[in-house]
Image: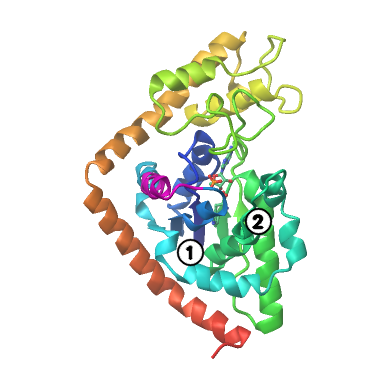
Amino acid sequence: MTKRVFSAFKPTGHLTLGNLLGAILPAVRLQDEADCVYAVADLHALTIKHDPERLRARTREAATLLLASGLDRSLVYIQSQVPAHTELAYLLESTAYFGEMRRMIQFKEKSANQEEVRLSLLTYPALMAADILLHRVDLVPVGEDQRQHVELTRDLALRFNRLYGETFTVPEAAHPPIAARVMDLTAPTSKMGKSDGSAAGTIYLLDPAADIRRKVMRAVTDSEDEVRYDPQEKPGVSNLLTLLAVCSGQPVESLAYEGYGALKRDTAEAVVETLRPIQERHTELSADPAELSRLLADGAAQAVERTAGLVAAARVAIGLP
Ligand code: AMP
Ligand code: TRP
């Protein structure tokens, strides 16, 4: 049986190198062996303060970048164009407990010290569970930070199945063996993120080569000069080694350097070369906005069709007419 795969990316900012190495490239590789569906999770971007025009623009940019990165052999669409996501999310909110939502690390981090916490930030994992369960998938390629949300998705699927009868496939997270947590270049003990990271420490997929070189050359390391992979003791150097290994296709163990300067130069070049074809393809695709709209509308129509049966089954199981 062909495996089924789903993952999504929220357009809260420009996509980063963390997104690419932690989830997009692993998703690209899965296309060879699985039936893959990928979405831009624009509804998830409504969980924090946002600007409507910017959200619309970033949603299209994210979709373009997913295709430009090689997800062009998958079904790609925009989450909000498939109403089944919100419909199933409500059924899962009615399966989940307040206590388990409140305990999610991401909710705790993003709500800490905030006056105005949107209710959707709390219920977000139910929507994410709906995204995944809608497609009856086996595998969810995600970075390390999404581990807890996929665990919760499994719990909700199992609970729903137990209470109302076998309805959902119980999915599993798939994390890449390396780069499941790319760190901020200026604060290598924090995740590189689009909204939470620093601009100087975050490489965006559309950054010009000169910016990438500057950011990598200024990456925080440590006061020794020994190049060694040791994420605990040497988070900055280990992060650079990770980027270099993944972007150059070499195992970390094979990378030997005398000093930090040479490591940074090679890392910068490897990242620039990894992003170059993606940026070129992004420019080509952006030249034809009507074609992108058509492709996304077609993706959404296919997703509506593919998920109708599952939503109907879940409705009946939970007791709706
Ligand atoms: P997000 O941008 O938060 O929607 O994340 C989209 C995907 O990228 C998820 O699978 C995340 O786990 C992954 N991701 C985001 N940031 C990183 C990072 N710094 N390192 C590895 N994976 C990441
Ligand atoms: N919550 C994920 C993130 O912040 C994005 C996402 C939304 C997702 N729905 C998903 C990831 C479904 C995997 C599967 O990174």
Q: Amino acid at mark 2?
A: His
Query: What range is drawn magenta here?
Result: 50-63
Whether label 2 touches label 1, CB < 8 Å? no
Tag 2 secondary structure: helix
User: Residue, x 53% and y 82% (percent of image)?
Assistant: 313
Q: Residues within 10 Å of mark 1 (few under 14, many from 20)?
A: few
Give the image quadrant in which the ligand numbered 1 is located. Answer: top right
Residue 16 location (% of width, % of height) = 49, 36
* Camera-side residue of 135 and 128: 128
* Residue 61: in magenta span: yes
At which x and y percent is residue 203? Answer: 49, 29
- Quadrant (top left, top right, bottom left, bottom right) of the C terminus: bottom right
* Up-down relation of residue 168 to residue 234 (above or below): below
Residue found 36% across the figure and 64% down from its top = 300
Image coordinates for residue 227, horizontal then vertical, percent: 66, 15
Q: Residue at x 71, y 28 (%)?
A: 231
Amino acid type, callout 1: Thr
Q: In 3D space, how far apart are the residues under numbered discs 2 and 1 (Cα atoms)?
A: 24 Å
Q: Nearer the viewer, residue 299 or 174?
A: 299
Can you identify the residue that label 1 sits on? 2
Q: Residue at x 72, y 45 (%)?
A: 112
Percent across and percent down for residue 200 are 54, 24
Vertical arrangement, residue 91 with respect to residue 276, above or below: below
The image quadrant of residue 189 is: top right
How many marks on residues? 2
**201 or 306, which lies in front?**
201
Residue receiving disc 2: 149
Asked if residue 123 lies left or right of residue 270, the reply is: right
- The dot on residue 241 is none
